[in-house]
Image: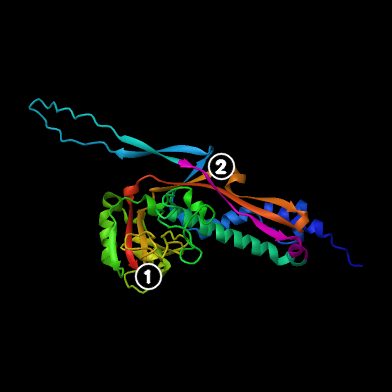
Amino acid sequence: MTEEINFNDVVARVKDALGGAGSSTGSTFFPTETSEEIIQIVYEQNFMRGLFPALPMTTRTINVPKLTGSVNFHAQTLSATESGTEAAESRQATSEITLTLKTMIANVPIGNYLIAYGVEGLLTVLRDDIASRLAYNEQNLFINADTETGSSYADNIMGAYNSSTNTTGVNASNNDYLLELDGLRKSATATAVSVSGTFALSHLRTAIANLGVYADNRDELALIVPRNLEVQLLGLTELQTLDKYGPSATILSGEIGRIYGVRVFGTGVIPTNLNYAGVFDGSTTTQTQAILLHVRSPLIGNPTQAERRFNMGFEDEPQRDRFVLIPRQDVAFGVRYADAICLLNGIDTV
């Protein structure tokens, strides 16, 4: 005799599994997909999670100190009695940046019939799609975010959203999470490199020089490039590929190699419709941009409360025979030393 399946029970079990419930709720009925697994996938797919330092946050906003001036050393001249001259007092000057947790949230309606008739494969699809999209959004946020809303968002580095001419732009309802903070591109203050054409390694050397003291240790530098430039770099003999690093090297997810000792990462979030100054203006849309930075300048803030790091809520809509899946994540991001970030502008997209 075949046991009759209660579809309402199946839906409830799917919700439990997505939310991270244990086996006592029936998760053994299908593969268990949990919030923790989604977080793990996000951290694996967003290379910046392993590249930049992170700070646990017990409150929504914290102030993080940074140095703005160093101790001065002086020569000491000894007299005949060996009583040296006293060095003038100097103190480390400090300032601070403010990290504030921001929320990214989605609204995903799911028909109950999809679960009733396709539960075996649905959980994996939902998990992978949410995780990969969240990883993409994090990269987008950390690199492209800009709080500027002037001229109806036209003054934003991403430009105003247009469904046909600028889908990566921002407004109140499209890519609006990019308005929450200032990312790497907006924060950079090191003298930018004007490529104005095809990228060459001489441009990277200039960018290294422009970082000054921040470039003293090449192991702490990273070059973040768009996909079209990544393909070009893969053809350079100067790119030291992963197989040549040696057994002691630490290799991060997304790392494609090293040039002059600088780790190189490719990403699909850097726009390819920019002008020669590295912003979207709606006129010149044939250029892209790369970023050279000291990896200890950016700072990611993570809430200590597990349910605020990532959580999935549910809202039943029985009148529509569906429920709404609500993934939500809190994250903070800031830059301590803006002069430790150098932009390479005007790189041809073809």
Residue placed most toward the observer, 337 or 179: 179
Residue furthest to the front in view is 151
Of helix, strand and loop, which one carries label 1? Answer: loop
In the image as oriented, which residue stretches furthest toward the right? 1
Near mark 1 (Cα within 10 A), the count class, few <14, some 14-19 or many ≥20, is many
x, y percent for residue 19: 68, 52
Position of residue 195 relative to residue 336, above or below, is: below
Q: Position of residue 144 (x, y in %)?
A: 43, 55
- Asked whether the viewer can see residue 214, the reply is yes
Residue at image position (9%, 25%) is 81
Q: How many angstroms separate mark 2 from mark 1 (CA)?
A: 41 Å
- The range drawn in magenta is 99-116
* Residue receiving disc 1: 349
Q: Secondary structure at mark 2?
A: loop
Q: Nearer the viewer, mark 2 or mark 1?
A: 1
Disc 1 residue type (three-letter) = Thr
Q: Which mark is residue 38?
A: none
Instruction: Please say if 243 is above or below 135.
Output: below
**Label 2: which residue?**
304
Find residue 89 and report its image quarter.
top left
Instruction: Give 175 or 329, whichever is nearer the viewer.
Output: 175
In percent of the image, x 74 and y 52: which residue is there?
Answer: 316
126 w.r.t. 314: above or below: below
| Labels 2 and 1 touching (C-beta < 8 A) | no
